[in-house]
Image: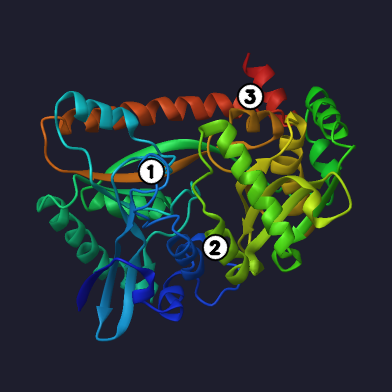
């Protein structure tokens, strides 16, 4: 058994890597695919030393792998970080306390998908039966790097609940967050979904959708997207990030083009056109799909149109899931406004291992208090959902 830390996905073949994460399924969880991670790497969205540290640098590939001779048995997509941007299960409060106590918080190692707050596999296994025997080896390797001061902490972000439980058994601290997920209840059309909402919310959603009637809105699958389409999508993405954050976004144009070439089977774009040509896209939401889930990932617009955002980022995605029989629509992190549009609160998971410091006890207590607060918040959010049955139950409770 050999353990190797890889500084590039070019050190392993797509066939070796994907055998651990997608098991020959054409539309498995897309973000652990070799093609997705390699597109970020080769497009300089990660591993770039030429960008400002605040926005795009500070992600350095450090994938943990276990081999038996030349056979890859297990892998963890991982990165060494010199900041906390682009993670979404944020730890800024902890980093600030470390700074106040003059303790080093970086570099840290994270088992995560860059810029992708979507729950999925973080430990890939050639055979699921290997989990019990390999998990201690993986964790021991990580603990050794922390003990050697290579990393100030190790963090697994957006793991499954099952993996979080196994990591807790290995001494990692459990942490949580709340996101919002739309779930398909066997609807045949969008109006079936609306009929499950109270009258006020039905009226609001119909009003918002009517505000976008002046645009031509199209659904484009990856194999339908031309080079001109992609250039327009990238323009929208960069313009929105520039306005909001003062930079052109985490994903480089080169990475987008690489994704277009290698992952067309997983890509869906909802686009608004102001004219008849491919260059006339003035807003777009770029999504990825798995066998049962649509993932809303990157949004951008060239116009100031609030309702267009709701249409492309939420309602078009809901319609798509209904049409194609997908069970879930994960529209991304944050956004309590998703709640009033039928997205239900769900708990998300992280696991953390910190180098021993005088703050260790305080961090443990903080995570416990945070989790209790999030449980209460999630319960209250469930009662605030606009579904008729939930509304009736809420009135009875009051």
Question: Crowding at label 1, few (<14), some or many (≥20) Cα neighbours within 10 Å?
Answer: few
Residue 337's label in the rendered image is none
Q: Which badge, 1 or 3, is on the more N-terminal residue?
A: 1
Q: Tell whether 334 sits left or right of 286.
A: left
Question: Crowding at label 2, few (<14), some or many (≥20) Cα neighbours within 10 Å?
Answer: many
Q: Which badge, 1 or 2, is on the more N-terminal residue?
A: 2
Question: For residue 121, which quarter of the picture?
Answer: bottom left
Mark 2 or mark 3, whichever is nearer to me:
2
Q: Secondary structure at mark 1?
A: loop
Residue 52's label in the rendered image is 1
Please name whichever residue, 285 or 323, is drawn nearer the observer in this view of the structure. Answer: 285
Quadrant placement of the C terminus: top right
Which residue is depicted at the point 62% across and 65% down?
260
Residue under numbered circle 3: 384
Please name whichever residue, 359 or 395, is drawn nearer the observer in this view of the structure. Answer: 359
Which residue is depicted at the point 43% across and 43% down?
86
Separation of marks 1 and 2 at Cα, in angstroms:
28 Å
Residue under numbered circle 2: 30
Residue 176: give x, y in percent of width and height. Answer: 40, 38
Residue 318 vs 254, above or below: the answer is above
Quadrant placement of the N terminus: bottom left
The answer to whether the residue labelled 2 contacts the one labelled 3, judged by CB atoms less than 8 Å apart, is no
Q: Which badge, 2 or 3, is on the more N-terminal residue?
A: 2
Residue 24 seen from this side: yes
Which residue is depicted at the point 50% across and 69% down?
35
Residue 307: give x, y in percent of width and height. Answer: 76, 31
Residue 37: give x, y in percent of width and height. Answer: 45, 63
Q: Secondary structure at mark 2?
A: helix
């Amino acid at each position: 058994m050999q353990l190797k830390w890889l500084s590039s996905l070019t050190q392993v073949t797509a066939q070796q890597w994907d055998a651990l994460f997608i098991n020959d399924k054409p539309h498995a969880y897309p973000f652990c695919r070799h093609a997705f991670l390699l597109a970020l790497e080769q497009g300089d969205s990660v591993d770039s030393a030429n960008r400002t540290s605040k926005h795009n640098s500070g992600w350095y590939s450090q994938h943990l792998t276990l081999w038996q001779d030349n056979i890859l048995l297990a892998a963890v997509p991982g990165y060494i970080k010199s900041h906390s941007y682009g993670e979404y299960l944020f730890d800024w409060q902890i980093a600030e306390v470390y700074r106040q106590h003059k303790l080093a918080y970086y570099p840290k190692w994270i088992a995560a998908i860059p810029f992708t707050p979507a729950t999925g596999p973080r430990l890939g296994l050639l055979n699921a039966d290997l989990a019990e025997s390999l998990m201690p080896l993986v964790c021991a390797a990580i603990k050794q790097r922390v003990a050697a001061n290579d990393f100030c902490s190790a963090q697994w972000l957006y793991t499954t609940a099952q993996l979080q439980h196994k990591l807790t058994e290995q001494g990692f601290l459990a942490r949580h967050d709340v996101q919002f997920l739309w779930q398909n209840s066997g609807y045949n059309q969008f109006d079936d979904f609306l009929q499950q909402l109270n009258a006020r919310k039905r009226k609001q959603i119909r009003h918002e959708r009517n505000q976008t009637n002046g645009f031509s809105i199209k659904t484009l699958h990856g194999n339908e997207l031309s080079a001109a389409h992609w250039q327009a999508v990238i323009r929208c993405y960069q313009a929105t990030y520039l306005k909001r954050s003062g930079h052109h976004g985490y994903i480089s144009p080169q990475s987008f083009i690489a994704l277009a070439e290698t992952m067309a089977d997983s890509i869906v774009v909802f686009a608004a056109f102001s004219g008849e040509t491919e260059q006339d896209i003035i807003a777009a939401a770029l999504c990825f799909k798995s066998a049962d889930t649509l993932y809303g990932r990157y949004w951008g617009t060239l116009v100031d149109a609030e309702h267009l955002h709701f249409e492309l980022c939420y309602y078009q995605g809901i319609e798509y899931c209904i049409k194609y029989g997908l069970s879930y629509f994960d529209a991304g992190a944050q956004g309590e406004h998703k709640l009033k549009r039928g997205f239900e609160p769900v708990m998300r998971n992280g696991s953390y291992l910190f180098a021993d410091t005088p703050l260790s006890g305080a961090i443990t207590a903080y995570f416990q208090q945070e989790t209790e607060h999030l449980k209460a918040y999630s319960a209250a959010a469930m009662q605030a959902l606009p579904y008729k049955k939930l509304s009736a139950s809420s009135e009875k409770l009051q």
